Image (cartoon, rainbow, N blue to C red):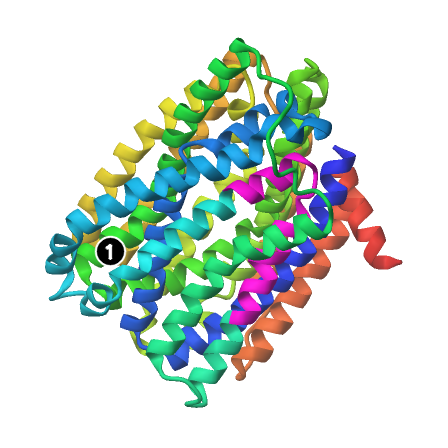
Amino acid sequence: MGIVIRQAFKSTIYSYIGAGLGFLTVWFMNRLWLTPEQNGLLNILISISLISGSLVNLGMAGVATRLFPHLRDSENNHHGFLMKAMLTTTIGFVLFAAVYWLTRDAIVARNEAKSALFAQHTELLLPLTFFIGAFYILDAYSRSIFQSTIGVIVKEVGLRIVILAAAVAYHWNIIDFESFVWIYCGSFCSMSVAMLIYLWRDRSLAWGKSSKKMSPELKREVIWVAGFSVLTGLSSLLISSIDKIIVNDRLGLAAAGIFSVATYFGSIIQIPARSIVRIASGVIAESWKNNDTANILDIYKKTCLNQFIIGSFLFIAICGNLDLLVGLLPVEYAEAKYVIFWMGLGYLIDMATGANGVLIGTSSKYKYDTYFMLLLVVFTFTTNWILIPKLGITGAAVASCSTFAIYNFLRFLFIWRVFGMQPYDRKMLVALMIATFSALVLWLVPAVSNAYISIALRVAVFSLVFGLLLYYSKVSEDMNKVIQRFRG
């Protein structure tokens, strides 16, 4: 777990720098400078492109995560993996482009009334899909060669700097909204270019054919893993993005924009988990190859505990100040309060179950994770379709929270039954007690007349109590090391 925590610490630092930049973007650009319809356009374009980008690489990103330990051979360009993966992505994109042009008129017609801005910009899905698909490959490859930090820097920091700078230029009337949209989408496209440049300069870009042929067994495994990874990756992105797409379809682009802004605040809770899981995936895959189940169980336990500690801290800090936070938003964002709560709770549940998806996805039972996801896609689509007309954007948040709970419960039961691994012990109970007591302290801190000062004061008191209890209880050795690092 040491390498996971060390690299995750660095990745988390960069992620929170990005989160800070993202917060400035959301707080000013999304809250004040753009209309809900304009917010909705940007988020719908990216949500769809994340799904289509995952689809066009035809499962090769999953092959990197699951099988790269078996392909690792720097002298032979890792069996030519990167060249084959990018060629496969290009073929997948050509197929996507053909489908897009065949269905474009129908897409435009369906969105002209409620989402006119989106109907005018559907062509941006083409470059976004290709370059995001390429980024998935390069990011998975970099994680597999234990260069996990670069993807975080590019996506969480570099991307947000460009977007924030473009937003300021738009606000100051240096550029118009159309130019801003193209810069916004272009920044997502440039992520894969930045990854390529870094890997080339670092001499980690193993580009070329291999002089050594794959064994027939490994070839078959690559095909199987790629096939299931298409379904798994697509299902995962559908689960995380389908709510925005259905909100746009049922309620319009303005509602989608409000929902996306509210979802951002809830997603802050999950940032550390993304960093931990990014690094853990390569380490767990290597451990499965070496049949080191003791190390896998250790990572499983520690990711559950540490992610719950971090997630509960952020969840309480945000939701304990929800009234103050929402009071700072424009009046049309009033319903965002409930979206933030339910999305935050869903992310907390997801964090408390640790690296369960990576554990299954890199094991010999990886197919079952696909089956779970396909089941959850049906559940997610159904609950969103039912709850959104009844509860509005809050219904989408409740549906997402329910999906997180059921999905992770199924994963927990599967890992326990098949691998005999159960990650929860007395330490998790102690962490829960610390979070509960600290939440009560936060609730008792009175608010003052200035909302910004109130939030800062309440979070400061809560952080002090939470940190002291966490440190002196010694519930997490990894968290204590992090606190000691800050203490100097």
Q: Check the image and report above or below for 417 versus 65.
A: above
Q: Where is residue 423 in the image (x, y as percent from the top left)?
A: 61, 25
Instruction: Name the one closer to the observer, 414 or 360.
Output: 360
**Placement of the N terminus among the 4 image quadrants:** top right
Q: Does the magenta stretch include residue 146?
A: yes
User: Does the image show residue 335?
Assistant: no
Instruction: Name the one closer to the observer, 401 or 245.
Output: 245
Q: Where is residue 356 in the image (x, y as percent from the top left)?
A: 54, 29
Task: Rate crowding at label 1 as few (under 14), some (14 to 19) or many (20 or more) other CA atoms within 10 Å.
Answer: many
**Residue drawn at (30%, 47%) of the image:** 242
Numbered disc 1: secondary structure: helix
Q: Specify the segment rendered in magenta.
A: 137-162
Q: Main secondary structure of the magenta part?
A: helix
Q: In the shown orientation, is residue 370 left or right of residue 314?
A: left
Q: In the shown orientation, is residue 173 left or right of residue 106?
A: right
Q: Check the image and report above or below for 280 versus 222.
A: below
Q: Mark 1 sits on what residue? A: 247
* Residue type, numbered disc 1: Val
User: Does the image show residue 312?
Assistant: yes
The quadrant where residue 326 appears = bottom left
Q: Where is residue 478 in the image (x, y as percent from the top left)?
A: 77, 41
